[in-house]
Image (tube, grey):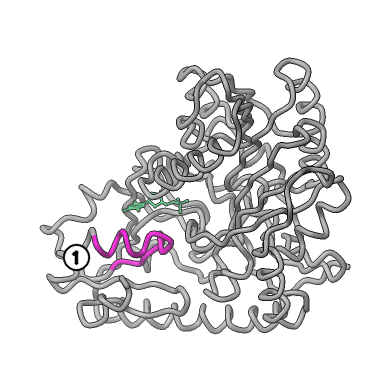
Amino acid sequence: MKKIFLNLGRQPITNSFLKKLDKKTLANEFFYNLKITFDTNTKLVSLLNFVKPEKMFNEKYAHRASSSLTMMNHFKKISLKLKKKFKEIRCLEIGSNDGAFIRNFNKKSVIAVEPCKNLAVITNKLGYTTYPKFWNFELSEKIKKKHGKMNIIFSSNTISHVPKLDEIFKGIENILKDDGLFVFEDPYIYSVLKNNSYDQFYDEHAHLFSLLAMKNIVKSYNLKIVNVEKLDTHGGSIRFYISKISSKYKVQKNVKKMLDLEIKNNLNHLKTYKLFATRVKKSKIKLQKILNKIKSSNNKIVGYGATYKSATVYNYCNINAKKINYIVDTTINKQNKFTPGSHIKIKSPEKGFNNKLNIKFAFLGAWNFKREILKKEMNYIKNGGAFITHVPEPRIINLKNVNKEIR
Ligand code: TMP
């Protein structure tokens, strides 16, 4: 039974950056109610109201996985690891974005699936056969007929985006070779609880997985979880290695270890999520206090990173252009646009974050890259600049405490 434990209020589509703020654009902006549920049977954490995938994943999709050096290195590492496991590689990626993962593979050995047409065009041009479609059973049939079964199926930050998980797993069961592995990674609910990172809840994250929940899900599809890893990416993620039940793979010790950890931390009880909701409400009040105090002393606050996550923070905490003057972001197709719901202008770092501007406070929207950013902006900090972050709790990072934050 699904129980609501958190209400993050009226929220926009996080990927819908606005080109202008005229009356028509504002009147057409889409909002929905962001409420989070815990299923007492399956232990799965999901949004109450799913946003239609077509509204989020279309030809306007802004995120480019390959724009992050951290992610490029991350994909290189996992590709090498997977390539070592098989003599002949037949690889399928679900949600290939701009090809950050598949670029590590031979073009002939990979089939990609990517519903955002602007992204599918990029990988097709690179020479990787890419289906500009949503993954489902029907597509798995089509690909199986044309390209055969696969021994590596990979997916990063995509499976959690799919409201109907049944379609995902039916398709996987259909196309996975008997000795194949389905490896996927998504933000981990345990990290969210630990870090108070409620901004992992937004339209695209239809679910946030635990091992407990995933175990319950896969058992209906003739599949088993053979290994699991905790990752640092995207503010704390979980990677599952899944095979056919009858495969040669033995279940690794990690699986029991992580299950024990989740049970010890009560991830199977609604009460844990209710307590988290109380911490989230406190976090909102504390962040608002910090921002109000800075503003009352007539200081500018700049946002650092127009992440999708930060849309949840801005809209839940009622932060708009009166609080955050503007945001800087390295992604070219976010620049010169306005954030969804909160309507804050986005500039390039060159224009909005240089020494001449004498900025003293920056809100770390991209907190998942905290170490990388603090190191990169050490001169800003040495010159008296500070960062504000809300993870795991709202606070100011400046020259006095920065070393502790980088460690
Ligand atoms: P992500 O968390 O969805 O990967 O998005 C990170 C966003 O933060 C992306 O739009 C790029 C931006 N960003 C910067 O603007 N500067 C930086 O130094 C880093 C690491 C990210």
**Residue at the image point whose x is 68% and y is 42% from the top:** 182
**Residue at the image point whose x is 58% and y is 78% from the top:** 280
Residue 250 as seen in the image, left or right of residue 395 = right
Instruction: Pick whichever, 179 or 39, lies toward us.
Output: 179
Residue 330 image point, x, y percent:
32, 46
Q: Is residue 372 magenta?
A: yes
Per the image, label 1 sits on a secondary structure element best described as helix
The part of the image, by quadrant, that contains residue 358 is bottom left
Q: Quadrant of the N terminus?
A: bottom right
The three-letter amino acid code for the residue at tag 1 is: Met
Label 1 CA crowd tier, 10 Å (few <14, some 14–19, many 20+): some
Q: Quadrant of the C terminus?
A: bottom left
Q: Is mark 1 within 8 Å of ligand 1?
A: no
Q: Give the extent of the magenta segment.
A: 362-375
Instruction: Look at mark 1 in the image and give the residue it sits on.
Output: 378
Residue 298 image point, x, y percent:
24, 76
Residue 241 image point, x, y percent:
67, 50
**Residue at the image point whose x is 44% and y is 48% from the top:** 74
**Residue at the image point whose x is 26% and y is 70% from the top:** 361
Instruction: Pick whichever, 257 or 169, lies toward us.
Output: 257
Vertical side of 156 occupied by 353: above or below: below
Main secondary-structure element of the magenta-colored stretch: helix
Q: Is residue 87 magenta?
A: no
